[in-house]
């Protein structure tokens, strides 16, 4: 039990003294993504090989949080040299131990290879990492999230000790204000001002809450922090409780995050055992406890007033504001809600000072921001960069650009209620204000990249479908408006669009502003941003009944080019609707009356032939008569 800040520092010194600087540490990403790619078997294989060779006193294996390079997981980092191996499998364990651990020899095939095929051994030199500034997630690969000792060894809970022993509550709030930190959950409201309102609200009973109800498709920033470094969130929450005058905190985690739930629960128990949670923390007289609450997966519960009602055991529906949660929140008491990433920033600000934090970013958007970079991008993963870095930097310098030689088309930022940004705006700085000017929002940090094969009308349809299902139904502009927008856009993608549809969509978007919460008010953004930048695609769907991206199933057809067909029977055998007429010696044709446009024939046709062709619209060339389809074994038409 740590009774004072001196006890904390003494305990930290003892932990560091027991660590052998010459001992190898094999850190294996054990985040959700890498676990799905075989990290558990890899860790077991490494442990087994170490035991077999009797190397337990010279090397340890550690399952850690996500280091971000999800495209190449499982990721392994070997200290003390930061040797980084990618795409590692359990079968590689013996070679890693025999070569790298015992003899200091690199396993070249597991190293990152640059464009010139040169191998890069040190993780920090890999372009994906080199172009980032990883203040929050950079420690994930250093920590076993189930061991508080790892967090203490890198200075963990030092910021809490500083706040409790050398600062007043007002000083902590002022430090957060001066840092310029804005909420990372989507709204971007200045965190210090929000804290100040809760601190000054009347009442002795107050609450601080972690919003970990991350529901955006393709987003996993908060999940990775909560899985990989839960103690940073706990420390930030306790500091916030002290600053605001709250003695009880809640962590609201979505049910679909089992590993995050497990790790935060373990971390809370460990902090309680050391006296970093509970009564009289570090002898300061401050008491604080944390309760974990599981959310049921309703997207609307990411909105803070809906979240509060859910915490109270009521249906998660937003309520009118004011009063704001800062004055009347959980059970009618002053409450402060921030998302996972915001809370994880707090220990860094208190430990390093507001000036350190505010040196990064832009005038109105300070610090770094974590993004989940997904979609049609070479380097899928978590990215942390200073505010103000351009979209081009993120997509090309870090993300590696678009795979398979395709062209970039758009990037969607801000989650389902965000916007799609075209190539002409790739040099837009990524911060709260500039993204709004481009017709999008930052949101919590989701970033979905799209290539030339993406239909922007269909993208709008997808997000409207998601939002219509996730609407709580309380407000008619949201409940009915989104449903009607989705119906219109769906009809457009199916070839049933008509003149006047676009104007109706714009009118419905205006009406959505009457919704109580941001879900309803921002739901039209996918439509408005795609209309702004890709209106010609909508018009092609409506007027010409064509999908320029050859994506909308109802507006494309497939036919087989007789000059390229080799009668290999691959499409014939794989056609579930039996729409292909063919034989070993006959050029194949597609019976358009039977074709359900599943694109299987297009996908199975060997690339070297490319005989199956997609056509926008329903008109395809007439098939060859039977007598002209016969093809002899040599490939010459009869």
Image (tube, grey):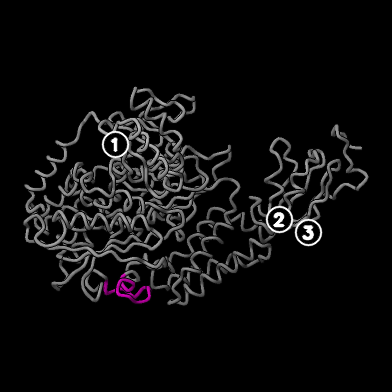
Q: Which mark is residue 597?
A: 2
Distance from the alpha carbon under mark 1 to that under mark 3: 60 Å
Q: Nearer the viewer, residue 165 or 538?
A: 165
Across and down, in percent, residue 302 comes to 37, 64
Q: Is residue 353 magenta?
A: no
Across and down, in percent, residue 560 comes to 78, 46
| Residue 208 in view | yes
Q: Circle 3: is it few (<14), some (14-19), or many (20+) Cα within 10 Å?
A: few
Disc 1 vs disc 3: which is toward the camera?
Answer: 1
Q: Is residue 311 magenta?
A: yes
Q: Circle 2: is it few (<14), some (14-19), or many (20+) Cα within 10 Å?
A: some
Q: Specify the segment rendered in magenta.
A: 308-324
Provide the secondary structure element on which disc 2 rests. loop
Q: Main secondary structure of the magenta part?
A: loop
Q: Which mark is residue 60?
A: 1
Identity of the residue drawn at 42% across and 73% down: 514
* Count of numbered circles on the image: 3
Q: In this image, 542 relative to 19: left or right?
A: right
What residue would you read off at disc 3? 594
Distance from the alpha carbon under mark 3 to that under mark 2: 9 Å
Distance from the alpha carbon under mark 1 to that under mark 2: 53 Å
Query: Quarter-wise, where is residue 262 in the image?
Result: bottom left
**Marks 3 & 2, CB-CB < 8 Å contact:** no
Across and down, in percent, residue 608 comes to 71, 35
Q: Nearer the viewer, residue 212 or 360?
A: 212
Across and down, in percent, residue 71 comes to 46, 42
* Above or below for 96 versus 414: above
């Amino acid at each position: 039990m740590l009774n004072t800040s001196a006890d904390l520092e003494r305990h930290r010194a003892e932990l560091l003294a027991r660590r052998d600087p010459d001992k190898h540490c094999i850190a294996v990403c054990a985040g959700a993504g890498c676990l799905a790619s075989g990290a558990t078997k890899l860790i077991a294989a490494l442990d087994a090989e170490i035991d077999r060779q009797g190397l337990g006193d010279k090397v340890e294996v550690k399952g850690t949080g996500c280091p971000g390079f999800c495209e190449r997981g499982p990721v392994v980092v070997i200290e003390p040299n930061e040797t980084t191996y990618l795409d590692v499998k359990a079968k590689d364990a013996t070679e890693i131990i025999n070569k790298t651990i015992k003899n200091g020899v690199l396993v070249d095939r597991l190293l990152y290879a640059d464009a010139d095929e040169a191998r890069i051994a040190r993780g920090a030199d890999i372009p994906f990492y080199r172009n980032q500034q990883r203040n929050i997630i950079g420690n994930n690969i250093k920590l076993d999230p189930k061991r508080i000792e790892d967090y203490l060894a890198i200075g963990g809970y030092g910021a809490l000790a500083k706040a409790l022993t050398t600062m007043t509550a007002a000083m902590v709030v002022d430090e957060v204000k001066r840092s310029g930190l804005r909420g990372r959950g989507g709204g971007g409201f200045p965190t210090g001002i929000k804290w100040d309102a809760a601190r000054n609200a009347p009442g002795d009973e107050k609450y601080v809450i972690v919003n970990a109800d991350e529901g955006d498709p393709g987003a996993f920033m908060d999940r990775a922090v909560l899985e990989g470094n839960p103690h940073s969130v706990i420390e930030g929450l306790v500091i916030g409780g002290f600053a605001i005058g709250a003695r009880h905190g809640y962590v609201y985690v979505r049910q679909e995050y089992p590993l995050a739930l497990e790790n935060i629960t373990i971390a809370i128990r460990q902090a309680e055992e050391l006296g970093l949670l509970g009564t009289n923390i570090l002898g300061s007289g401050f008491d604080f406890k944390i309760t974990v609450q599981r959310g049921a997966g309703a997207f609307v519960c990411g909105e803070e007033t809906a979240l509060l009602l859910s915490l109270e055991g009521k249906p998660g529906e937003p309520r009118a504001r004011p009063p704001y949660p800062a004055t009347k929140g959980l059970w009618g008491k002053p409450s402060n809600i921030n998302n996972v990433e915001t809370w994880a920033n707090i220990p860094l600000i208190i430990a390093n000072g507001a000036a350190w934090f505010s040196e990064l970013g832009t005038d109105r958007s300070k610090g770094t921001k974590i993004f989940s970079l997904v979609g049609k991008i070479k380097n899928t993963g978590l990215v942390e960069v200073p505010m103000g870095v351009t979209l081009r930097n993120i997509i090309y310098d870090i993300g590696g650009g678009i795979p398979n030689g395709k062209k970039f088309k758009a990037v969607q930022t801000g989650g389902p209620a965000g916007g799609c940004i075209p190539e002409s705006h790739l040099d837009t700085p990524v911060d709260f204000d500039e993204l709004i000017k481009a017709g999008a929002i930052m949101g919590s940090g989701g970033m979905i990249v799209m290539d030339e094969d993406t239909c922007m009308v269909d993208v709008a349809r997808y997000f409207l479908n998601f939002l219509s299902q996730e609407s709580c139904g309380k407000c008619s502009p949201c409940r009915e408006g989104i449903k009607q927008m989705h119906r219109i856009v769906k009809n457009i993608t199916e070839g049933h669009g008509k003149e006047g549809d676009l104007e109706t969509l714009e009118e419905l978007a205006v009406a959505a502003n009457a919704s109580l919460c941001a879900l309803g008010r921002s739901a039209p953004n996918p439509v408005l941003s795609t209309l702004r930048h890709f209106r010609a695609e909508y018009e092609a769907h409506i007027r010409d009944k064509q999908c320029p991206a050859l994506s909308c199933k109802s507006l494309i057809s497939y036919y087989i080019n007789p000059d390229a067909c080799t009668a290999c029977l691959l499409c014939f055998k794989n056609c579930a609707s039996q729409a292909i007429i063919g034989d070993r010696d006959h050029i194949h044709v597609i019976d358009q009356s039977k074709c359900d446009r599943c694109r299987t024939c297009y996908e199975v046709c060997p690339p070297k032939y490319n005989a199956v062709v997609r056509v926008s619209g329903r008109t395809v060339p007439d098939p060859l008569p039977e007598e002209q389809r016969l093809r002899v074994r040599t490939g010459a038409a009869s």
